[in-house]
Amino acid sequence: MTTVITVPPSLDDETFEQVFEQVAAVSADQKVLIDARHTRWSSPYGLTALLAVGQSRGEQAAFTGPEAEDTASYWARAGFYRHASEIFEMHGKVPRTREATAESNVLLEITDVARSDDVHTVVERIQSRAQAILVHELHLDPQATMRFAMTLSEVCQNIVEHAGQGGWVAVQTYQYRKRLGRRAVVIAVCDAGLGFRRSLESTPGWKPRDRWDDAAALEDALVRGVSRYRDPGRGQGLAGVRRFVGKWDGKLSIRSGTARITIVPEWDDAVPLKEGLPHFPGAQVQITIPERVTPG
Amino acid sequence: MTHHNIDVGSVLRRTVCDLYSNLVTRPTGAAVRKEIEVVLSGLDQPSLTVIDFSQVGLLDFSCADEVVGKLLDGVRRQVIVTDAYVLVRGVRDDHIDAIDAVMQRYDQAVIVEGEDGAWHVVGPLDEPMRRVLDEVQRCGRAATWELAAAVERPASDVEASLDGLLARRLVMREDDSYVSLQSVM
């Protein structure tokens, strides 16, 4: 029996919880059909997390994409279908993927990350476009470009070092009307691999604490800079990302397992640590950096 | 004293990929560090090596840990070579962000030349040590009593600071004097 997973009309990190909830209720070895026919919009998080859902299934999931042509065409240009066709059993109309005409707001189309070389590719690609968009359109400090690429490099390396399998990254700018009323650049990095708790549990000699769950693992990694490696230099990548995001008044959220930790800026009202979410493997990261508003 | 310059950008292109200009990912950093360690271990001792980042695009935290953190930790603990000193030059502000984060983790410090051409200490160093180091760098070479007079502190305090700077390999000792690394470049 195939279970239909209904994708909401507007897909972002909050509404994606509806997808996770439906997916968590179906055993991984059972067939699911991801039904996005009525979806009209998706953030980069939504697109990369959909791929992670496909990756998480033991029995290959089926997928049917948006009926709205402009939405389907946009997803194709963002690179979604190229990856989706490798993961899902595709149903319905599949737009042709064209290499040309990249969207002006897509800094980095959906790119798979599995090896260190992929991180080099991501960084090389983003640098060529980031300067123009971050500095001239989002009015960030000119030095932000390099730090932005560092941030991207570190979050992508989390996949390579901790996921145990590949994942996806995408970077876009869009008008973030809902909360900000201004533009923002969004990085989404999603995988369905080990996740933070299992990664930290693989530390040699690791023993569980009194309170040990996905939320505790996320706090250890993001707040305390704990890594599964013993080297003193380990665990600073996410700490550095957190510092940069804070400097830009940005938002950083990491979902893993049943918890999500968020570094919440003033303009947002997210819960800093949310527990008891529907279980989903791996890690799903979103970084939102708003357009800088110059005083006066 | 043996002097040696290492262009990290060239090492990166030679050892990892001739198309790369960014120092990102741990495997890349580890490959570059190992190449530098081979060079350091072949130098006559004592040695002063200047590691030049001017041809490096991006330096992320992971690579900064591999190339700067682990390298300097090995130099300090004398597991790579027994008597080596290291300066870093050609770094931009974003490189310094990454190097500083690494130095904090190791509780170490390194002297770097920034974009402005000035030398800075990057990493944690208490204020008395910082003042003594500034004075050694200003003089180029000075005895303990001269430094004590300059920073207006008892000689015993200054000696303690100098011991800390020697342990961090931020100054050299020659006979009864302390010498800045830059002065022997």
Image (tube, coloured by chain):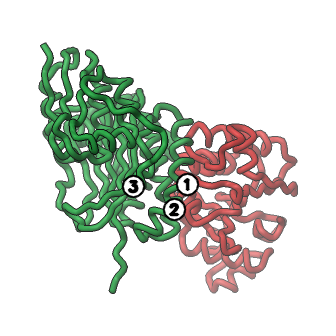
- Label 2, secondary structure: give it: helix
Q: Residues within 10 Å of mark 2 (few under 14, many from 20)?
A: many
- Label 2 and label 1: CA atoms lie apart by 7 Å
Is B99 placed left or right of B76 in the picture? left
User: Chain coloured red: which letter?
Assistant: B
Q: Do the residues under discs 3 and 1 have CB atoms within 8 angstroms? A: no
- Count of numbered marks: 3
> Residue at coordinates 48% horizontally, 43% vertically from top-left?
A100
Circle 3 residue: A105
Circle 1 residue: A128
- Label 3 and label 1: CA atoms lie apart by 14 Å
> Residue at coordinates 28% horizontally, 67% vertically from top-left?
A182
- Report the quarter where the N terminus of chain B lies: bottom right
Is B82 placed left or right of A149 in the picture? right
Q: Residues within 10 Å of mark 1 (few under 14, many from 20)?
A: few
Q: Chain of mark 2?
A: A
Q: Which mark is residue B1?
A: none
> Residue at coordinates 56% horizontally, 40% vertically from top-left?
B26
User: Chain coloured green: which letter?
Assistant: A
Q: Is B82 rendered above or below residue A192?
A: below
Circle 2 residue: A131
Is A174 placed left or right of A21 in the picture? right
On the same chain: label 2 and label 3? yes
- Label 3, secondary structure: give it: loop
2 or 3: mark nearer the eye: 3
Residue A164 percent location from the top left of the image: 41, 27
3 or 1: mark nearer the eye: 3
On the same chain: label 3 and label 1? yes
Residue A16 percent location from the top left of the image: 19, 41
Question: What is the three-letter code of the residue carrying label 1?
Answer: Ser
